[in-house]
Image (cartoon, helix red, strand yellow):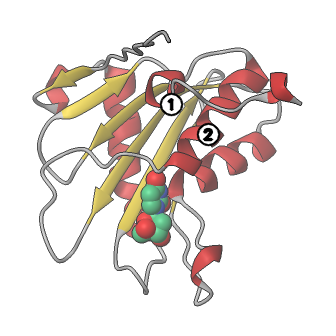
Amino acid sequence: MKKITITTQYDSFDSLEELSENDRAVLLLAKKSLENSYSPYSNFKVGAAVLLRNGELMGGSNYENASYPLCICAEQTVLTTAANIYPGVAPLVIAIAIRNPAQVIDRPGLPCGACRQVICETEMKNNQPIRVVLQGETGPIFVFENGRDLLPLAFDKTFL
Ligand code: THU
């Protein structure tokens, strides 16, 4: 038996001012985009925004359904929309913002497993890393240099 240890890493920033101009702009758009959230069932608003490698910025939000499993996460909204509007253009950064009207969340909202898998697929498809920027309504900002750092043992096409 061998024990395997996996390590991951991210940077934690105390404020928006500490971020690069690019990362700050994407995070601010994610925060703005959560206002478009359609989330009457969970009341949990998620905004996501991407900066593409052609300089375009796009935002998206979660989109729920009375048939609960059909809820679409903000990350998937924005990544699939960007891939259709700008085919072949890889994302450089994705930012994710959250708001829970019932309580102020002061730690970053972590993307669900399915969204991590979609971020990893997009990295692999384009052969380019995507920086992931996360913040709660307040509090620290976590920056992961790529989606893989959020999902080290991702499933991928090499198994197919
Ligand atoms: N949600 C996202 O949009 N992204 C995630 O990474 C986690 C969850 C949404 C789905 C649903 O509309 C609400 O948050 C509560 O789960």
Question: Residue 75, image x and y in percent?
Answer: 54, 49
Dividing the picture into quadrants, the one containing residue 72 is bottom right
Q: Which residue is drawn at 43% across and 86% down?
A: 41
Figure quarter occupied by ligand 1? bottom left
Check residue 151 in the rendering and tell me which mark sits there, or answer none. 1
Check residue 86 in the rendering and tell me which mark sits there, or answer none. none
Front residue (pair 22, 146): 146
Q: Residue at x 36, y 56 (%)?
A: 32
Residue lying at the far front of the rendered structure: 1
Q: In this view, does 104 lie above or below 112?
A: below
Give the labeled residue for mark 2.
Answer: 117
Q: In the shown orientation, is residue 97 left or right of residue 137?
A: right
State whether residue 60 appears in this view. no
Q: Residue at x 60, y 36 (%)?
A: 119
Q: In this view, does 97 lie above or below 46?
A: above
Front residue (pair 158, 116): 158
Crowding at mark 2 (Cα within 10 Å: few <14, some 14-19, many 20+): many
Front residue (pair 89, 4): 4
Amino acid bearing label 1:
Leu
Tag 2 near tag 1, CB within 8 Å: yes
| C-alpha distance separating marks 2 and 1 | 7 Å
State whether residue 35 appears in this view. yes
Residue lying at the far top of the rendered structure: 2
Q: What element carries label 2?
A: helix
Question: The C terminus appears in which quarter of the rendering?
Answer: top right
Does the Cβ of the disc 1 residue fall within 8 Å of ligand 1?
no
Q: Earlier in the sequence, mark 2 or mark 1?
A: 2
Q: Is residue 79 above or below residue 144?
A: below
Amino acid bearing label 2:
Gln
Q: Is mark 1 on a helix, strand or loop?
A: loop
